[in-house]
Image (tube, rainbow, N blue to C red):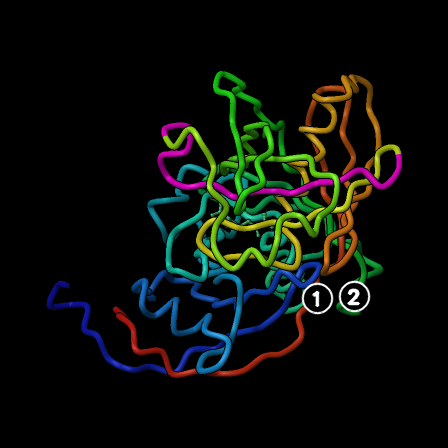
Amino acid sequence: MTAARARRPAPQGFAKGHGAENDFVVLPDPDNRLDLSNEDVVRLCERHTGLGADGILRAVRCTATPEATAMAADAQWFMDYRNADGSRGATCGNGIRLLARYLVDAGQHEPGAFAIATRAGLRHVHVPTRSHDGSGPVTVMMGRPRLPGSDSIEVAVGHRRWPALHVDMGNPHAVAFVEDLAHAGALLIAPIVTPLHAYPHGVTTEFATLRAPRHLALRVHERGVGETRACGTGACAAVAALRTREMHSTAARYTVDSPGGRLRISAHADGTMDLTGPAVVIAHGTITLPCTQA
Ligand SMILES: N[C@@H](CCC[C@H](N)C(=O)O)C(=O)O
C-alpha cells in the first residue's frame, strides 16, 4: 500500500442483478479508485452477511485502467470480473450481459450495440432499444470457442466418471455429457477434473444432457464460485462440445436450460457464438466498503 492510498471505510454505490439467476453485485468505479482485496470480495458475495452474489462486476472506464487502455478506442467501459472467492476471471457471459443492461439503465451508455472490454478482450453486446424498461433479453457476442483437445479429460464426482471435452471460451471449461443431471450429485465440492496439468488455474465444469436436437439441459460448477444457477460461458462451452461431438458444421441455434432459466445460443458459420438471455437489475443501494480508495 502506498502513502497515497489509505485503507478507510467509504460509501460506495452498487447495483444488484442477475442473468438467468447467475447473480452479481455491480460496483460503478469509473475512475478506478477501488482496490478490492479478495477478502472484500468474499465479504460482499457472502449470502448471509454480505449482499450475496456469484461475483462482482466492477465497471471502470477503459481510460482509467492500464488493463484496458489498449481497448479504449473501441469501448468506454472495462468489466473487472471477480469470482465470489475473490479470484479474477477473464470474462463472464452472464455478467457482461448484466453489466450492459446496468450501463444502459444507468444512462452511462446508449442502448443498441456497443463493446465492453474484458481481460479476454473486447466483447460486443446488444441491448435492444425497446427493452429500455429494464427487462428483455441482452445479447453478447462470445467469440469463437477453442477446443485444444490434446488431453483426454475426465470428470469425476464420487464413484462416477465421465469423459469430458476441454473448451476455452476465454476461460477454461470441461464439459461432460451425462445421462441424468442428478448424477452430478449435490456439487457442494468441486468435481475432480483430470489430468490436473490441463487446468493449471482451475476449471469450470459443465454437466450436460440432450433434451432434444440442439436443446441441452445444464448444471455448472463454476471455478471460484461453486454451483451456479446458470453460466453464460459454460452454456456456450456445452454447445461447442455438442457441435464437436455431433459434427455440426453449419450455423444453428441452440437452447440451453439451466436451473436459473433459458439461454439461447446462435452458432455462426465462422464458428463464433452469440449468447442471449435475461439480464435484470433488481436493486440499487449504497454500502460502506472497507477497501482502499485513492
Ligand atoms: N458465470 C460466468 C463465468 C464466470 C467466470 C468463471 N467462474 C471463471 O472463473 O472463469 C458466465 O456466465 O460466463
Comparing 176 with 242, the one in front is 176
Query: Which residue is the site of mark 1?
Result: 280
In the picture provided, is 120 more to the left or to the right than 217?
left
Screen quadrant of the N terminus? bottom left
In the picture provided, is 4 more to the left or to the right than 158?
left
Q: Is residue 117 visible?
A: no
Badge 1 density bin: few <14, some 14–19, many ≥20, Cα 10 Å: many
| Residue 35 position (above or below residue 205) | below
- Looking at the rendered structure, the kind of residue marked 1 is Val
Identify the magenta region. 197-212
Comparing 117 with 45, the one in front is 45
Q: Tell me whether the residue at label 2 lies in contact with that at label 1, contact meaning CB atoms closer than 8 angstroms.
A: yes
Badge 2 density bin: few <14, some 14–19, many ≥20, Cα 10 Å: some
Q: Kindly state the secondary structure of the residue where label 1 is placed.
A: strand
- Looking at the rendered structure, the kind of residue marked 2 is Ser
Comparing 249 with 161, the one in front is 161
Estimate the x, y position of residue 119 in percent, counting from the top left.
44, 42
Screen quadrant of the C terminus? bottom left
Query: Which residue is the site of mark 2?
Result: 135
Which label belongs to residue 136? none
Mark 2 or mark 1, which has the lower sequence index? 2
Q: Is residue 28 magenta?
A: no
Q: Quadrant of residue 49?
A: bottom left
